Image (spheres, helix red, strand yellow):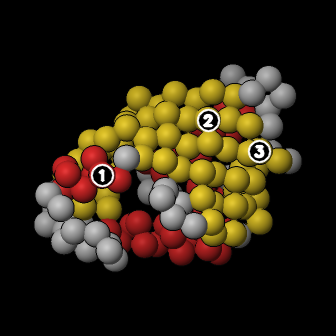
Amino acid sequence: MSSAETLIRRYYDAFNQANWSAMLDCLADDVAHDVNQGGRETGRDAFAAFLGRMERSYREQLKDIAVMVSADGRRAAAEYVVHGEYLADDEGLPPAQGQRYVLPGGAFFELRDGRIARVTNYYNLNDWIAQVGG
């Protein structure tokens, strides 16, 4: 396994363990985070705030994770299946009532100096809304 793949798997292992500090340790200080169907947030502090919002509203596990790395190790992608529970209302989304959902997702990464410098997440928001009854 390449060092790039090891980094991405460590990032997702930390996610699945809800170990936010270990997840943040995988990121460059100036990480760019492209939120699904949203804007770009920059920096570890912004990413930590995002994780706080996620932890409040969702409980998720990623399964069937496939990681792909470019030949030069500077870019990577991952595909996975999200198994989640919607715990508390998230702004602009349907009310939360403990609804469960399963949907595919993916992410694209830029890697620099052994850390994640950019992560761009994607999942089908309309599919998620349909599953939670929006």
Whole-percent x and y of residue 114? Answer: 80, 45
Q: Position of residue 75 (x, y in %)?
A: 74, 37
Tell me the crowding category of disc 2: few under 14, some 14 to 19, or many 20 or more residues within 10 angstroms, Cα based.
some
Question: Residue 53's spot in the image, x, y percent?
Answer: 43, 72
Residue kind at label 1, given as amino acid type = Asn
Q: What residue do we see at 69% from left, 28% from top?
A: 69
Q: Which sits earlier in the primary sequence, circle 2 or circle 3?
A: 2
In the rendered structure, the answer to whether residue 132 lies left or right of residue 17 reads left
Amino acid type of the residue tagged 3 in the rendering: Leu
Q: Is residue 51 above or below residue 64?
A: below
Can see residue 92?
yes
Q: Which comes before the other along the chain, label 1 or label 2?
A: 2
On the question of residue 10 being in view, the answer is: no
Foreground label between 1 and 3: 1
15 up-or-down from 40: above or below: above
Is 31 placed above or below 11 here?
below
Q: Secondary structure at mark 2?
A: strand
The structure residue drawn at horizontal position 79% and vertical position 23%, both measured from the top left corner, is 71
**Residue highlighted by disc 3:** 111
Describe the element under mark 3 as helix, strand or loop: strand
Per the rendering, the mark at residue 95 is none
**C-alpha separation, residue under disc 2 versus residue under disc 3:** 11 Å
Which residue is the site of mark 1?
A: 126
In the picture provided, is 25 more to the left or to the right than 107? right
From the viewer's perspective, is 16 left or right of 44?
left
Disc 1 to disc 3, C-alpha distance: 30 Å
Q: Quadrant of the N terminus?
A: top right
Q: Which residue is mark 2?
A: 77
